[in-house]
Each structure stands twice: as structure tokens, then as C-alpha cells.
């Protein structure tokens, strides 16, 4: 390739801002290529840290016939395993003929794109982009943003040229659902975790406590709220924890971190500081995006918390990566289902978190955690150089020689 390759980075839903920009990946890619950011929210303030082009994402879906064929193929794969190979082959063949969208194809041609990088292979915004790129012969690289993706949507209807997953279990699950996959499949770690943990130490304990109205002398127990509506019992749990926590050994104090998508004030009146994280949430646009200044504050909260209490959720992995014990509340039925879900098998089976079904268990487990008896394991993928691994995968897909010098690893 005589010119610098052009890479389209798709920031489709907002969390990719942390994975692609705040991790430093986009900055690193810009040293070897021309990186174009494309997103449905080019006016988002969170994207202003990027000094390169920010382009409006084409949002034209695939045609109705292709969507119906994909839905039918999914039903066949789910209900008639013996017909799985035929369904997968038919979907891939149809995708090569009538899949993708004219808007995406025109975008790639207009900007001379050579490769597409996304955080998902199955979402409504990324699947047409990947299929269009495949049909044009472009390289497609997927750096999964959530460990749950392979469990909830294991089949890749538009197989990418390269795919990075968090850990070995996801790689096995993907291979099982896509036995014909011939692309580059790697275990690369989490860009999201890398972005947060790289900001460790920027805000100290005193500053964190000042900002969030905490007592610097007492242990911090952070409660991370679930999505609103996930359980009607959540507010009752939080009220009881906030009331009882000062009476537990060590006199811990509760910090309630609201869910970024919560537009209510349901925790008002709780006997604890309520922290509303700096995320931009636009329900109508399905856009939930962390502001750049949220990362160092969140990193400080991870570092200074003695313990996390939350429903079974992805935030568990962030505390585990920071070496902190996690108690997952499983009392409400909806949360019990999450705890026992296939996507949560790593957390459940490898002891990353402890399941809690009632307040008596919570009191006991909190005491053990504050005494240092519940230190969680830290899997290798949580310590992986996710930015370096992602960069190496993209360089390999584009046949670029290794960089001669260390690029910038973080966006200020």
C-alpha cells in the first residue's frame, strides 16, 4: 500500500469513546494511518478530545429482504442444529449479494477507506457497516467492547477479517457458533478497562472524598446502580445498606454511583452521597457516552473503594481488574437470572464476585471483605496490554510493518 491506509473507526453507541479514544488506541493508529472517526453523534462533546476528522455515520439499515433472511437463518440455527451449516452458508451468500447498504458503500468509496474497526459484529449500527465493507473487499476488525457479546450474539452474520475477544472462554464460544470462521481470532483483553486503569493515581483519596462528599478516614463501599427498571427492589436494598453500613465493622461509608442511563431521582433521600457519573445519555438516539473527565474520577473510585456492591453486571469486571472484592446482589429474581446466565459464567465459576441473597449474607460478606478475606483473582486478560494487542491486530490485518517507536498510549 503506497499511501497511508485509511481506517474508519466506528463509535456507534458511546462506550466505544472510552475504548477507542480514551484508551489511546485512536491516537496510536493515527501515527501509522489516517484514522477517521464516524459516529451517529458527531456533535458529542465527549468526542472533542479527538483531533482528527469526525464524520456522521451512515445509518441506513440493510434491506427488508436481507433482514428477514437473517431473522429466518437465526431461527433455523436456534431450533434445527443439523441445518446450521446450510443456514450460515445461505446467510453469508445472500449478504455478499444484497447485504449491507448503499449509504455505507458510498461512504467507504468517498473517503477511500481501507479498513473498518468496530466494537461489535452484530449490532444494528455495525452489521450493515461490516457487511458493506466485506462486499467491497475491505479489511474489517472487531474489538469487542463487552465480554457478554459472544454469549448474547455468538454468530457473526458478516464475519470480520479479525476479531479480538476478552478471554479464552469467549474465543471458544465464538468458534463453536462460527465453525467456518477463517479470520484472525485473538484474545486481546479489554480496551475499556485499559482506558480506566491507565488513569490510576491522577486523583488521590483526599480529592476524591472532597468531590464526592466522603469521609477520608472511613472505608468506602461503592454501590453501582443497575439500569432503571431492572428490579423494583433496588432502592429498598440501597436504603437498608446505607442505613446499616455505619454499624458494620470498620464503620464503612456507602457511595451510590448512579447508572448513566438513569433519568430518575430514585435515590434521593438515601443516607449516602449519590454520584451521578458524567456520561452523555440520549435515549432517542441510543447514545450513552462517558465524558473524558469521568475516567480519572472513576479510576480513583475503583482504587480507593474497599468493596463494590452491585447487581450482576459488567461493572464487576472493572472492580475485579482493580483488585477489589465484589458482592453481587442476587436477591431479586431478575438479578438471580443474571447471576446464573451463561454470559456470567466466568464471574460465577472463577470467583470474581460473591453472590448475596439476603442482608444477613451481605453483613457477613462485607465484614470478610473489609478484613481482606475476599480478594478476587485477576485473570490474565484483565492485565493484558489491550491497546498494544489491538494495534498489533490492526497492523497485521493491513500488513503494516511493526512501529519503530513507542506511540502515545493515552489521550490527555
Image: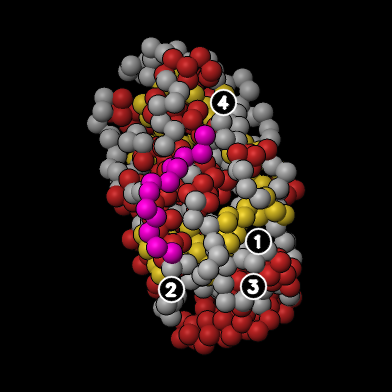
Name the disc covering residue 192, or none: none
Looking at the image, is mark 4 or mark 2 nearer the viewer? Answer: 2
The 10 Å Cα crowd at callout 1, few under 14, some 14 to 19, many 20 or more, is many
Question: Quick check: 237 left or right of 228?
Answer: left
Return the residue found at the far left: 373
Looking at the image, is mark 1 or mark 2 nearer the viewer? Answer: 2
Which residue matches tag 4? 275
In contact (CB < 8 Å): disc 2 and disc 3? no
Asked if the magenta segment contains residue 408, the reply would be: yes
State which tag comes first along the sequence, 4 or 2: 2
Which residue matches tag 1? 125
The 10 Å Cα crowd at callout 4, few under 14, some 14 to 19, many 20 or more, is some
In contact (CB < 8 Å): disc 3 and disc 4? no
Q: CA distance from mark 2 to mark 3?
A: 17 Å
Looking at the image, is mark 1 or mark 3 nearer the viewer? Answer: 3
Choose between 14 and 218: the one closer to the eye. 14
Name the disc covering residue 132, or none: 3
Amino acid at each position: 500500500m503506497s499511501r497511508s491506509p485509511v481506517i474508519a473507526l466506528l463509535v456507534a453507541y458511546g462506550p466505544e469513546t472510552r475504548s477507542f479514544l480514551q484508551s489511546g488506541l485512536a491516537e496510536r493508529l493515527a501515527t501509522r494511518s489516517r484514522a477517521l472517526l464516524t459516529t451517529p453523534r458527531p456533535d458529542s462533546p465527549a468526542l472533542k478530545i479527538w483531533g482528527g476528522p469526525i464524520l456522521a455515520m451512515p445509518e441506513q439499515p440493510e434491506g427488508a429482504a436481507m433482514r428477514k433472511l437473517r431473522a429466518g437463518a437465526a431461527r433455523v440455527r436456534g431450533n434445527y442444529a443439523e441445518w446450521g451449516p446450510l443456514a450460515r452458508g445461505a446467510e453469508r451468500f445472500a449478504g455478499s449479494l444484497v447485504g449491507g447498504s448503499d449509504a455505507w458503500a458510498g461512504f467507504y468509496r468517498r473517503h477511500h477507506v481501507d479498513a473498518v474497526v468496530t466494537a461489535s459484529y452484530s449490532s444494528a449500527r455495525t452489521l450493515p457497516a461490516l457487511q458493506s465493507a466485506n462486499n467491497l473487499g475491505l479489511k474489517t476488525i472487531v474489538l469487542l467492547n463487552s465480554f457478554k457479546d459472544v454469549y448474547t450474539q455468538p454468530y457473526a452474520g458478516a464475519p470480520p477479517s479479525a476479531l479480538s475477544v476478552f478471554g479464552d472462554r469467549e474465543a471458544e464460544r465464538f468458534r463453536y457458533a462460527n465453525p467456518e470462521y477463517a479470520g484472525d481470532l485473538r484474545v486481546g483483553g479489554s480496551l475499556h478497562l485499559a482506558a480506566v486503569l491507565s488513569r490510576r493515581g491522577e486523583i488521590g483519596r483526599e480529592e476524591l472524598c472532597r468531590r464526592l462528599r466522603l469521609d477520608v478516614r472511613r472505608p468506602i463501599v461503592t454501590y453501582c446502580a443497575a439500569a432503571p427498571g431492572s428490579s423494583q427492589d433496588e432502592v429498598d436494598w440501597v436504603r437498608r445498606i446505607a442505613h446499616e453500613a455505619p454499624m458494620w465493622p470498620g464503620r464503612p461509608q456507602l457511595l451510590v454511583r448512579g447508572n448513566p442511563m438513569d433519568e430518575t431521582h430514585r435515590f434521593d433521600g438515601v443516607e449516602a452521597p449519590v454520584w451521578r457519573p458524567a456520561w452523555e445519555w440520549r435515549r432517542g438516539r441510543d447514545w450513552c457516552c462517558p465524558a473524558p473527565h469521568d475516567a480519572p474520577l472513576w479510576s480513583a473510585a475503583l482504587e480507593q473503594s474497599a468493596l463494590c456492591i452491585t447487581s450482576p453486571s459488567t461493572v464487576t469486571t472493572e472492580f475485579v481488574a482493580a483488585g477489589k472484592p465484589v458482592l453481587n446482589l442476587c436477591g431479586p429474581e431478575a438479578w438471580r437470572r443474571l447471576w446464573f446466565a451463561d454470559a456470567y459464567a466466568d464471574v460465577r465459576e472463577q470467583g470474581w464476585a460473591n453472590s448475596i441473597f439476603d442482608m444477613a449474607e451481605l453483613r457477613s460478606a462485607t465484614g470478610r471483605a473489609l478484613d481482606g478475606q475476599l480478594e478476587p483473582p485477576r485473570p490474565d486478560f484483565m492485565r493484558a496490554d489491550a491497546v498494544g494487542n489491538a494495534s498489533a491486530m490492526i497492523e497485521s490485518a493491513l500488513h503494516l510493518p511493526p512501529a519503530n517507536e513507542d506511540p502515545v498510549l493515552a489521550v490527555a
